[in-house]
Image: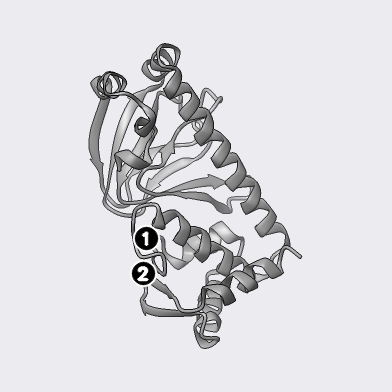
């Protein structure tokens, strides 16, 4: 995953300095890496598996704010505390760096500072796009947009861009898109019946008509 992570922009000396303060460890499926409100002591890079970011609203409802895939950083924030629960949705492996140590490296290496800023800007753009999708799209449009975004992210890992792994369950997708689980299941079926996707497995979506799926997703933005 190195070519996807922040260290891809660093020299050999800089990578070595980062590795000296990095700890790699496994996170079991269902485990919680950090909880909202806890002191933000570490930042993490996911190297295998998948994580979800969860906020619990005042009325008790759960909102899945995003999913973390291999190569993604999590815990980068201006806040002193974690803003969401970080939970594993598959057997995973992460690299951990202390916030204080990361701050020292950022001051020492300009490449690292620029790479982190670039990553933060990318995450902000993605969050804004997601908010627009949630606010204006109907369920089929939301799900089409979600599948396409996930396909694009997985394509960075040199995966088949038309075969999309779904490490998250239908309930997670529902809580991310602001839908019920029943609506998500029905919408998957509707997209399959329309010939846009195939569902060879519960955790796999195969894109059959990318142009049609893109057209559907863009309808909610017109």
Q: Are marks 1 and 2 in contact (CB under 8 Å)?
A: yes
Q: Position of residue 200 (x, y in %)?
A: 35, 79
Q: Is residue 207 above or below residue 26?
A: below
Comparing 108 with 186, the one in front is: 108
Tell me: 165 left or right of 171: left
User: Which residue corresponds to mark 1?
Assistant: 167
Residue at image position (71%, 58%) is 135
Mark 2, Cα crowd under 10 Å, few <14 / some 14-19 / many 20+, is few
Q: Where is residue 204 in the image (x, y as percent from the top left)?
A: 37, 71
Q: Is residue 110 visible?
A: yes
Residue at 36% across, 16% down: 101
The spot of residue 189 in percent (x, y) is 51, 82
- Give SS at disc 2: loop
Query: Would you say 11 lies left or right of 53 here?
Result: left
Which residue occupies 40% across, 56% down?
154
From the viewer's perspective, tell me whether residue 214 is left or right of residue 97: right
Which one is earlier in the sequence, the residue at label 1 or at label 2? Answer: 1
Q: Which of 188 and 198 is in front in this view?
A: 198
Above or below residue 64? Residue 146 is below
Q: Please tell me the numbered disc located at residue 116.
A: none
Residue 2 in picture, x, y percent from top left: 30, 38
Give SS at disc 1: loop
Q: What residue did someone put label 2 on?
A: 203
Does residue 63 sit above or below 163 in this rendering? above
Can residue 57 be seen here? The reply is no
The quadrant of the picture occupied by the N terminus is: top left
The one of 112 and 86 positioned closer to us in this rendering: 112
Please tell me how many numbered marks the rendered image carries.
2
């Amino acid at each position: 995953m190195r070519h996807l992570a922040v260290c891809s922009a660093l020299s050999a000396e800089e990578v070595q300095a980062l590795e000296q303060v990095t700890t790699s460890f496994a996170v079991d499926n269902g485990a919680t890496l950090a909880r909202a409100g806890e002191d933000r002591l570490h930042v993490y890079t996911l190297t295998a598996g998948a994580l979800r970011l969860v906020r619990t609203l005042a009325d008790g409802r759960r909102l899945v704010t995003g999913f973390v895939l291999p190569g993604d950083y999590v815990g980068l924030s201006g806040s002193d505390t974690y803003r969401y629960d970080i939970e594993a949705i598959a057997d995973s492996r992460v690299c951990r760096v202390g916030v204080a140590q990361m701050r020292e490296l950022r001051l020492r290496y300009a490449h690292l500072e620029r790479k982190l800023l670039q990553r933060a800007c990318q995450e902000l753009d993605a969050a804004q796009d997601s908010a627009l999708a949630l606010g204006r799209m109907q369920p089929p449009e939301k799900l089409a947009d979600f599948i396409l975004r996930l396909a694009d992210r997985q394509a960075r890992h040199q995966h088949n861009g038309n075969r999309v792994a779904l490490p998250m369950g239908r309930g997670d997708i529902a809580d991310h898109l602001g839908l019920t689980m029943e609506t998500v299941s029905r919408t998957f079926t509707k997209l399959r019946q329309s010939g846009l996707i195939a569902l060879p497995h519960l955790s796999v979506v195969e894109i059959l008509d990318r142009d049609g799926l893109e057209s559907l997703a863009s309808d909610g933005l017109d």
